[in-house]
Amino acid sequence: MKKLSVLCTVVFTCIALLFTSCNALQPKSAFEPISGFSDQANEQLAEVFDAIAKETDEVVVAFDWGKTICHKSEGSGYLSHETVIEHAKENPEKVEASNAVIEADAADADNYFILRSSEYWKGVKADDIANLGYETYKSQFEVFPAMRDLIQQLQSQNVRVLIISNGDFYTMRTVVEKELGLDPETSLYSYRSEVDSSGVCTGVLLPPMGEGNSKDQILAELIDGQLFLAGGDSALSSDGPMMDMAKFQLVVNPKEEDVQQILDQWPNAIIVYPE
């Protein structure tokens, strides 16, 4: 009987050690709570990062740009059309074309805005647009610190981060590279003009960034399988189809009256207010 008791003790000890070892082998995320996000949002994001750690295939996340990652420091506006305004100040002959861009943006007609903007930048060097875009960013805009932190943590987990925008690629190119540490050639997908051998924009839009492509359609061309996380500020409009593609949804600065409808659409949506 004594031998049996000792044997049972040994067996139970081995089982306990095995269970502990198995738990130790479970992948754990290295997520650090993000300042500017609520406790609830950080708890939800910790679960997202735990899920990322268990993935064996490539993990892809996608974010909208304007008012999701980057916002105007004072007032409202988007980097792409504010850069057009700044350019027109130094090029009076372009004022009429600049006004057409702003009118298109005010009408909330994305495709019309894309067409007008591509027409505006025709004949301008892509590098000059990128330089002016970064100067405009530094004087009028900023990246939400909390969103920069989130993107950096995702990168540390070898997650592929994509930015899908209706803005201009060259306007945003340097900002994405310098402020987020992302390679715009592989991370930034927005409308983009062809450039000629001298680096000048021709106004011909390149796929998949061209006219008529919504964000979900662009993503469908870029990735295989399910999008892991999608983030945007307009969940009930232009960012909604992209979010429908994702396993997890991050909604940035929604209006209070829209929150319940967002949660009806995605019950586990992560709501954040980084401002």
Image: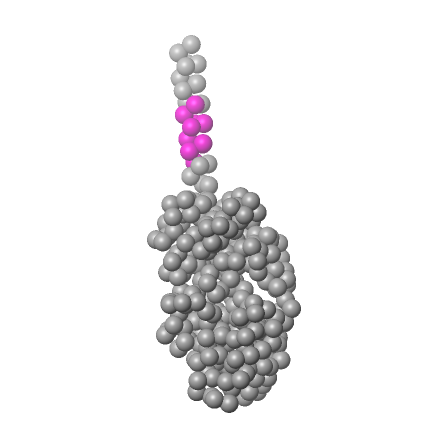
Q: Quadrant of residue 154?
A: bottom left
Specify the quadrant that holds the C terminus: bottom left
Residue 19 within the segment the image draws in magenta:
yes
Q: Residue at x 63, y 71 (%)?
A: 211
In the rendered image, residue 94, in percent from the top left (x then y), is placed at 51, 86
**Percent x, y for residue 182?**
46, 66
Q: Is residue 147 above or below residue 86?
A: above
Membership of 59 in magenta stretch: no
Q: Give x and y (percent) for residue 156.
A: 42, 57
Who is closer to the viewer here, 139 or 1?
139
Q: Is residue 165 above or below residue 157?
A: below
Decide if residue 50 is in sight here.
no
Of 74 and 208, the residue lying toward us: 74
- The stretch of residues the image draws in magenta is 12-21
Which residue is drawn at the image coordinates 46% and 75% (left, top)?
82
Q: Residue at x 46, y 83 (%)?
A: 87
| Most common SS among magenta residues | helix
Horizontally, is 31 left or right of 160 in the view? left
Residue reaching furthest to the left: 35
